[in-house]
């Protein structure tokens, strides 16, 4: 149970952080006319192609007591970053980055350019246009981004193993827990945990998709627009 | 209210290299002065009309030029002024209308008034909805409105902000004539009080007829004529313009003879022996000219006509026949190929078919001289 709660806490934190930093970045990627944009797009997509162990390895080195992140963290908080929950959140944010950014960029790009121009011509600045036109029309994309980053974080294994290790209540997430039980031939416990995660994931996704499809669009849109 | 507002003329001088995917490369290069009232900007598609409106609205940055409303400078390439669209206080209704699909009629109309206190905003929204007869659309989303209703809401949304200039890019395309007339009447009534310059882009002839006190003709990025609707529509001096106003036939030829006493001249078709008598124009013998003829102005006969006042009678052969709606389009080769419109009834009675020998009859004054 401890592992399950930890996984959910981690996934929620990561989704929330990605929502906050993902919006402005996705907005920029969708609308910037800068020629070097493809460079940033490539960086954002890197976690899609890198094996989790490679990403995890670099993060572990960076977070270690001699790494730049690790030293900075030590200076700020008086303890290291590797093998902590914060370190896990940071690693997961990077690992799930493309899963949040790409649906957001696609949603923003999908908003009819003429609507954005019409908003500007009616006197709205960029922020107001974003808040009152782009965002309400991108609600399905925002929901997709959140669901994907949540699900991807719950399901991650390699990165957690590299930077988090296996500390109960701190970094021992469901995927690690199941792996650990299987390693110790405790199939009953592994099965219980695996099934629980399967059931919760399915229920969660069903609710989100159902809401997003039907009532969702209208309710969410008016809620965001206010 | 508002009758005291006198926003001043719109002055435009722009240069803009225009490029787009469908090979219409041209340089927009023109000077315009638009005063209060409706001015039609007329020209074939690809003439640069929309690009011009985009420059005025601030959606496109001209390469050089100056745009001002009254004393207020919106664009001045020399001093580097280029106001953002949201700072220009102009209204622009796109052909696509661009109503916000997630907002109701009244939310769409109130969008530009967010800074006003709620009570004043609601009052202005009510007023403009009534002026354009769309009070019943207050709670409806654009997806629940008809084409004509959407246009009225789009106009109301733009005008409720008391803009200094109104730009309209083919706002009534696709509506039937009755609906168009109703909307035009409401627009005129609104502008009788506010008296702002309205620049109305169209390539539709009946809109020009309905609106055209003042028409500016554009072709290939330049102003090629200005005047009343009749002056512009009936004397096209440019090939592109002729196509736009519905001259299906554009025939190139050489002037062979001037008959000044009769007020006519003879033109021989290029690479053919076919000759046409056309009204005397500003052309010397031997010069190359283009003659524009409407397909509906040509008569078609299956026997050689005689004793007619029409001066141009040509023998030819039908190359193709195509029925489109209530119209049959015949292509007839008389040395030059003419496009002729006949009714389906006439096509049946005359037993028109491909390869049939026919005669075309053309009045001299149905031939319009177009500068080469």
Image: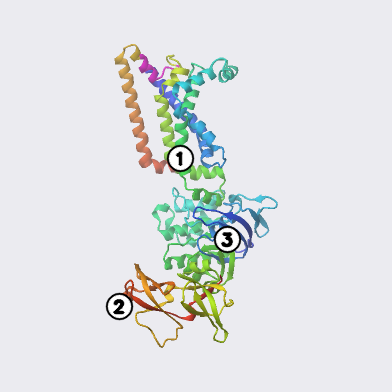
How far separated are the C-alphas under marks 2 and 3?
A: 46 Å
What residue is shown at x 34% (from left), y 79% (from top)?
A: B302
What is the span of residues highlighted in magenta in the rendered image?
Answer: A170-180
- Res. A214 image quadrant: top left
Q: Which residue is mark 2?
A: B349
How far separated are the C-alphas under marks 1 and 2?
A: 60 Å
> Residue A135 lies in magenta, yes or no?
no
Asked whether B161 or A183 is in front, the reply is A183
Q: Chain of mark 2?
A: B
What residue is shown at x 35% (from left), y 68% (from top)?
A: B322
Q: Secondary structure at mark 1?
A: helix
Q: Which residue is mark 1?
A: A106
Q: Which residue is mark 3?
A: B221
Q: Secondary structure at mark 2?
A: helix
In the rendered image, residues at marks 1 and 2 fall on the same chain: no
Where B345 falls versus B217 (above or below)? Answer: below
Q: Which numbered mark, 1 or 3, is in the foreground of this view? A: 3
């Amino acid at each position: 149970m401890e592992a399950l709660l930890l996984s959910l806490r981690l996934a929620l934190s990561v989704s929330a952080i990605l929502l906050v930093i993902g919006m402005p970045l996705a907005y920029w990627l969708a609308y910037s006319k800068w020629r070097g944009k493809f460079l940033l797009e490539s960086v954002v997509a890197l976690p899609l192609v890198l094996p989790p162990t490679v990403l995890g390895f670099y993060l572990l080195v960076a977070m270690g007591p001699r790494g730049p992140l690790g030293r900075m963290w030590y200076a700020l908080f008086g303890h290291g970053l590797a093998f902590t929950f914060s370190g896990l959140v940071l690693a997961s944010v990077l690992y799930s980055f493309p899963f949040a950014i790409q649906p957001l960029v696609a949603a923003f790009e999908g908003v009819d350019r003429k609507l954005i121009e019409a908003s500007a011509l009616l006197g709205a600045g960029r922020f107001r246009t974003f808040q009152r036109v782009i965002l309400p029309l991108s609600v399905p994309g925002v929901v997709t981004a959140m669901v994907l980053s949540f699900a991807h974080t719950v399901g991650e294994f390699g990165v957690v193993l590299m930077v988090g290790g296996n500390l109960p209540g701190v970094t021992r997430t469901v995927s690690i827990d199941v792996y650990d039980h299987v390693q110790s031939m405790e199939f009953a416990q592994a099965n219980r945990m695996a099934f629980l995660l399967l059931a919760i994931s399915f229920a969660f996704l069903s609710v989100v998709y159902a809401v997003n499809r039907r009532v969702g669009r209208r309710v969410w849109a008016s809620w965001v627009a206010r | 209210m508002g009758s005291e507002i006198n926003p001043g003329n719109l002055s435009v001088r722009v240069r803009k290299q225009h490029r787009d995917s469908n090979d219409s490369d041209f340089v927009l290069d023109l000077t315009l002065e638009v005063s209060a009232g409706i001015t039609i900007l007329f020209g074939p598609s690809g003439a640069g009309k929309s690009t011009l409106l985009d420059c005025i609205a601030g959606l496109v940055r001209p390469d050089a030029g100056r745009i001002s409303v009254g004393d207020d400078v919106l664009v001045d390439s020399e001093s580097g002024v280029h106001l953002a669209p949201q700072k220009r206080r102009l209204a622009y209704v796109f052909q696509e209308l661009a109503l916000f699909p997630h907002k109701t009629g009244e939310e769409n109309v109130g969008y530009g008034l967010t800074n006003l206190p709620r009570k004043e905003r609601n009052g202005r929204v009510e007023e403009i909805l009534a002026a354009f007869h769309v009070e019943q659309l207050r709670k409806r989303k654009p997806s629940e409105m008809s084409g004509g209703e959407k246009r009225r809401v789009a106009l109301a949304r733009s005008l409720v902000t008391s803009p200094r200039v109104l730009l309209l890019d083919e706002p009534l395309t696709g509506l039937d004539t009755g609906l168009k007339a109703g909307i035009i009447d409401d627009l005129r009534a609104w502008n009788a009080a506010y008296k702002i310059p309205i620049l109305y882009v169209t390539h539709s002839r009946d809109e020009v007829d309905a609106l055209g006190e003042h028409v500016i003709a554009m072709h290939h990025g330049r102003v090629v004529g200005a005047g009343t609707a009749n002056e512009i529509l009936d004397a096209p001096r440019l090939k592109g313009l002729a196509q736009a106003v519905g001259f299906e036939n554009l025939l190139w030829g050489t002037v062979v003879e001037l008959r000044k006493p009769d007020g006519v001249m003879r033109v021989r078709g290029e690479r053919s022996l076919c000759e046409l008598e056309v009204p005397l124009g500003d052309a010397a013998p031997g010069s190359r000219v283009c003659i524009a003829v409407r397909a509906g102005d040509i008569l078609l006969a299956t026997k050689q006509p005689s004793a007619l006042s029409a001066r141009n009678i040509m023998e030819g052969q039908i190359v193709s026949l195509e029925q489109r709606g209530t119209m049959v389009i015949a292509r007839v080769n008389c040395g030059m190929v003419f496009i002729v419109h006949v009714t389906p009834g006439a096509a049946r009675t005359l037993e028109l078919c491909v390869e049939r020998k026919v005669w075309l009859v053309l009045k001299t004054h149905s031939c319009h001289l177009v500068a080469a």
